[in-house]
């Protein structure tokens, strides 16, 4: 296509509001424009990228036998009420009424609708298994739409759903998706990990996320290079290291020693005041659960993992200052696990060692606290896993990376088929709920992750498979007839060969063309300059390595084979 005819509004400066590199570059290179918070317009180049990603997704989904269909974006409330999610989901769901006053919503996902369809159309075990997918718009009133197209309020998702007679069937469908997803993300040129994840509002059993490592990611994942363990920090386990106890009494006979810590409340204040490492402290956090107050205990260097605690004590909230005062007679900052009967849940790491804790007395801490001897607690993993802690499956050090969730797979089981009565008749004629899985991919997140992982100071470096074009022809002097003649000939010949070509036919300075070409990031640039033409040559620049190779103008096949690698 011709640059002069395309809408490619490149910008000299980064948009001021953008933080993520992919956000800056997609705007600057003329791929997207923001309409309003979390709403983006894809310009021609941006849309070509999305379409290429969608093509790869379709091919891989079709390969595992999935069938493409399309479901509405506008949903009647009743179906969402039947599964309970109408009430469970809060402000993230866009709700509206139709002219007849009926409640409706905009689909944030399609489990309800697809299960309704299965309940109507699937009768017998003979019709199973099935996998259905669509590439369809989703709407979510995200609390913090940000980072460009990484988190928007309207976005495209490839969502697929599997229907099986039993758990073994579901396991097969799940693994088919795993394989398809690995192919999709590899073919899109992404570095990615598949990690264990928290099923969250989807419910059901096992789930995994596909994570593209990037500093722009909102998720953090724990990874083990030794055994391959990987999990979102939302659920990652870890074996904490055992701290050395230099100046704390190790000897059990050496009982507590109260130390004055006037006005020193936070771990930072107390550790620096007593000149002890944070690992030597017990952090006591008072929360109020449905069954009353609970003291959560973690080591001073650890952060309480609220989701892990929730699994043990159910829903809870932080205790207010006056609640703490009323229960323990002291302000938060000096509270500790001893001398009261409040339920205590302690991190596993506290089973060993001797610590400093709050003294439940204004202005005091206690040294020499030995859990189990000095107080009883329930022990569990309730801290957020950290880099260098032991891998929960092999014990070797974990690393923690930021990552973008580009896709996920869930085993739903019968969570949706039971309320929506999606049953099949088995061989004996008995009605059995269909066993389901749900699988999502965000094409926009793939595009943005590809930029996060592939760029330099001059712009984007597209993986060839999802680049808006394969080759960018740069005739430097459009006033020179020979330049134009060669450029047009190459353009025509490459197109005939099925190569997607962008030709910069603008009457612009060479410097501007080079800058825009690097910014847009097509993997190969064919530079047609007068000097080389005199020798019958053109230059082909590899956008990533910046290597330049000269080719004879006639040597089209060599140029093509280079561009196809
Ligand atoms: P997140 O935790 O990042 O909000 P999610 O768990 O809500 O993601 P799903 O509901 O499972 O995501 O959606 C499947 C896929 O859709 C995600 O893996 C992601 O690629 C994409 N996606 C989800 N929310 C958004 C969004 N707001 N903007 C763009 N893509 C999204
Ligand atoms: Mg979400």
Image (cartoon, helix red, strand yellow):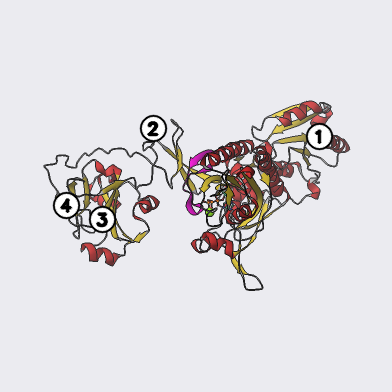
Which x, y percent locates residue 206?
48, 44
From the image, which quarter does the C terminus lie in?
Answer: top right
Report the residue marked by disc 4: 259
Q: Helix, strand, or loop for circle 4?
A: strand
Report the residue marked by disc 2: 394
Q: Helix, strand, or loop for circle 2?
A: loop
**Could you tell me how far apart the alpha carbons at marks 2 and 3 are, in whole angstroms?**
32 Å
Q: Does 418 sit left or right of 522 as displayed?
A: left
Q: Quadrant of residue 106?
A: bottom right
Which x, y percent locates residue 445?
60, 47
**Could you tell me how far apart the alpha carbons at marks 2 and 1 are, in whole angstroms?**
53 Å
**359 inside magenta stretch:** no
Identify the mark nearer the N-term, 2 or 4.
Answer: 4
The part of the chain drawn in magenta is 189-215
Figure label count: 4
**Could you tell me how far apart the alpha carbons at marks 1 and 4 are, in whole angstroms?**
80 Å
Identify the mark nearer the N-term, 3 or 1.
Answer: 3
């Amino acid at each position: 296509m011709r640059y002069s005819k395309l809408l490619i509004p490149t910008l000299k400066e980064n948009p001021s509001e953008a933080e993520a590199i992919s956000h800056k570059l997609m705007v600057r290179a003329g791929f997207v424009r923001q309409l309003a918070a979390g709403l983006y317009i894809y310009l021609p180049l941006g849309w070509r990228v999305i379409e290429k990603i969608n093509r790869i997704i379709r091919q891989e989904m079709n390969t595992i036998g999935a069938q493409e269909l399309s479901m509405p974006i506008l949903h009647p409330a009743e179906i969402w009420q039947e599964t309970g999610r109408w009430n469970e989901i809060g402000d993230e769901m866009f709700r509206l009424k139709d002219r007849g006053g009926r409640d409706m919503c905009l689909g944030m996902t399609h489990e309800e609708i697809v299960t309704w369809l299965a309940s109507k159309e699937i009768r017998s075990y003979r019709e199973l298994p099935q996998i259905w997918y669509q590439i369809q718009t989703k709407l979510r009133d995200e609390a913090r739409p940000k980072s460009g197209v990484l988190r928007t309020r309207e976005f495209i998702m490839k969502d697929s759903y599997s229907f099986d007679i039993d758990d073994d069937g579901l396991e097969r469908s799940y693994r088919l998706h795993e394989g398809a997803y690995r192919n999709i993300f590899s073919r899109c040129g992404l570095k990615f990990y598949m990690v264990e994840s928290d099923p969250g509002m989807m419910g059901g059993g096992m789930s995994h996320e596909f994570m593209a490592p990037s500093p722009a990611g909102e998720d953090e994942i724990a990874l083990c290079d030794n055994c391959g363990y990987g999990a979102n920090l939302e659920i990652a386990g870890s074996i904490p290291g055992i701290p050395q106890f230099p100046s704390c009494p190790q000897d059990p006979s050496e009982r507590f020693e109260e130390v004055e810590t006037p006005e020193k409340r936070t771990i930072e204040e107390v550790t620096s005041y007593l000149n002890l490492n944070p690992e030597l402290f017990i952090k006591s956090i008072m929360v109020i659960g449905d069954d009353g107050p609970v003291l959560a205990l973690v080591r001073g260097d650890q952060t309480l993992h609220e989701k892990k605690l929730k699994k043990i004590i159910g829903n809870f909230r932080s205790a207010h200052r006056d609640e703490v005062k009323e229960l323990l007679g002291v302000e938060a900052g000096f509270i500790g696990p001893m001398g009261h009967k409040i339920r205590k849940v302690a991190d596993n790491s506290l089973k060993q060692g001797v610590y400093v804790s709050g003294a439940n007395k204004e202005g005091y801490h206690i040294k020499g606290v030995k859990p189990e001897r000095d107080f009883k607690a329930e022990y569990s993993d309730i801290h957020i896993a950290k880099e260098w802690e032991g891998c929960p499956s092999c014990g070797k050090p974990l690393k923690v990376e930021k990552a973008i969730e580009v896709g996920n797979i869930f085993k739903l089981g019968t969570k949706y088929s039971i309320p929506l009565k999606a049953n099949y008749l088995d061989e004996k004629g008995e009605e059995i709920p269909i066993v389901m899985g749900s699988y999502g991919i965000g094409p926009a997140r793939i595009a943005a992750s590809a930029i996060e992982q592939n760029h330099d100071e001059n712009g984007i470096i597209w993986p060839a498979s999802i680049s808006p074009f394969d080759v960018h022809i740069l005739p430097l002097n459009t006033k020179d007839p020979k330049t134009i003649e060669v450029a047009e000939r190459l353009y025509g010949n490459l197109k005939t060969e099925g190569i997607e070509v962008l030709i910069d036919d603008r009457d612009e300075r060479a410097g501007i063309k080079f800058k825009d070409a690097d910014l847009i990031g097509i993997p190969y640039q064919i530079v047609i300059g007068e000097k080389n033409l005199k020798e019958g040559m053109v230059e082909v620049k590899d956008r990533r390595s910046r290597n330049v190779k000269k080719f004879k103008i006639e040597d089209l096949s060599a140029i093509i084979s280079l561009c196809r690698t």
